[in-house]
Image (spheres, grey):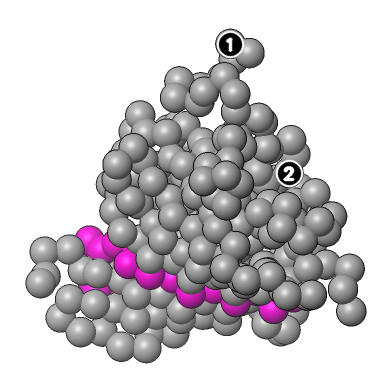
Amino acid sequence: MSAFPLPGFRETALVDPFEIFVGPIYEQGEPPARSFAFLVDERHVNMRGVIHGGMLMSFADAALGQAVWDATERAPSVTLNMQSQFLKPAKAGEVIQVKPELIRRTRSFVFMRGDFQVAGETVFAATSVWKLLGQD
Amino acid sequence: MSDRPTGIPPEAELASTGGFNKYIGPLYRLPDAEEGAVKRFAFAVADKHMNGAGTVHGGMLMSLADTAMSRTSRLASGARSCSTVSLNCDFVGPGKPGDTIEARVRVTRRSRTLVFLSAELVAGERTLLVATGLWRIAGEV
């Protein structure tokens, strides 16, 4: 495992091939209060040298999805909607962290959000709606 | 070029020459539709794009939407670069192995500093994702 610049984090066990391909991601804490982080590297940036919006949204979908798992005893679910706000560019070498917040869980939906921070400053925010499969 | 993935037509132009787009790609630009009103971009689904349920990962769909809408912002504004301010995505249906997924992007409004866009991601007749978003024209103060 490559050296990760934040002490106390462990690698998150990922299932989805796309997340493994763009990862790894790291976590600390225990369910349902895990926070997640990843190190921006050269694979993740665009031609201007700042992180691609697609990578931020992919990390958000992965991290908020892990939090949905924590909130539902790992019930199968899918993302129905995600709203993303891009507040400030992040660069290769920076670590992006999020502590997902459960807004509400109903019988068939989970509402989740996260502020994504670099060194305590929010650079990206996302809110997503998840559908629990098999629940009308 | 015979190194194109199945499903990408010969008239497609490579749109991913570096960085994240090249890593997750290749991504292609297809000829415009509706007399230039619709800009089109596409990729052919590969194993690396999938989630654990065997459908295309939402992060990959949002990445294509972001790239296609950013490029369209540049085409509409003439600016060398545009940055995403906000993006709203509805996941309407699953992308599947073997799909060629196409983004169809329209400009809703362009001001001096901003471009408002909408996009639809389709695989053949199936709609996979609909998106609206706001881009800032870089270089403007």
Q: How crowded is mark 2: few (under 14 residues within 10 Å), some or many (20 or more)?
A: many
Residue A112 lies in what quarter of the image? bottom left
Which amino acid type corresponds to the residue marked 1 in the rendered image?
Ser
Give the mark nearest the N terminus, 1 or 2.
Answer: 1
Whether residue B128 is visible here, answered yes or no, is yes
In the image, the segment drawn in magenta is A71-89
Residue located at (46% from left, 78% from top) = A127
Report the chain holding disc 2: B
Point out which mark residue B23 bears.
none
Q: From the viewer's perspective, is residue A60 above or below residue B79?
A: below
- Give the distance between the C-alpha atoms of the residues marked 1 and 2, in whole angstroms: 23 Å
Residue B80 spot, x, y in % from top left: 84, 55
Q: From the viewer's perspective, is residue B8 above or below residue A88?
A: above
Which amino acid type corresponds to the residue marked 2 in the rendered image?
Gly
Left/right placement of residue A30 relative to residue B71 reads left
* A79 in the magenta segment: yes
* B48 in the magenta segment: no
In this figure, which residue is indicated by the disc labeled 1?
A: B2
Q: Are marks 1 and 2 in contact (CB under 8 Å)?
A: no
- Describe the element under mark 1 as helix, strand or loop: loop
Residue sitting at the far front: B35
Report the chain holding disc 1: B
Residue A64 spot, x, y in % from top left: 43, 71
In this figure, which residue is indicated by the disc labeled 2?
A: B19
Residue located at (50% from left, 49% from top) = B104
Residue A11 spot, x, y in % from top left: 53, 57
Whether residue A1 is visible here, answered yes or no, is no
Residue B38 spot, x, y in % from top left: 55, 50
Residue A75 lies in what quarter of the image? bottom left
Q: Residues within 10 Å of mark 1 (few under 14, many from 20)?
A: few
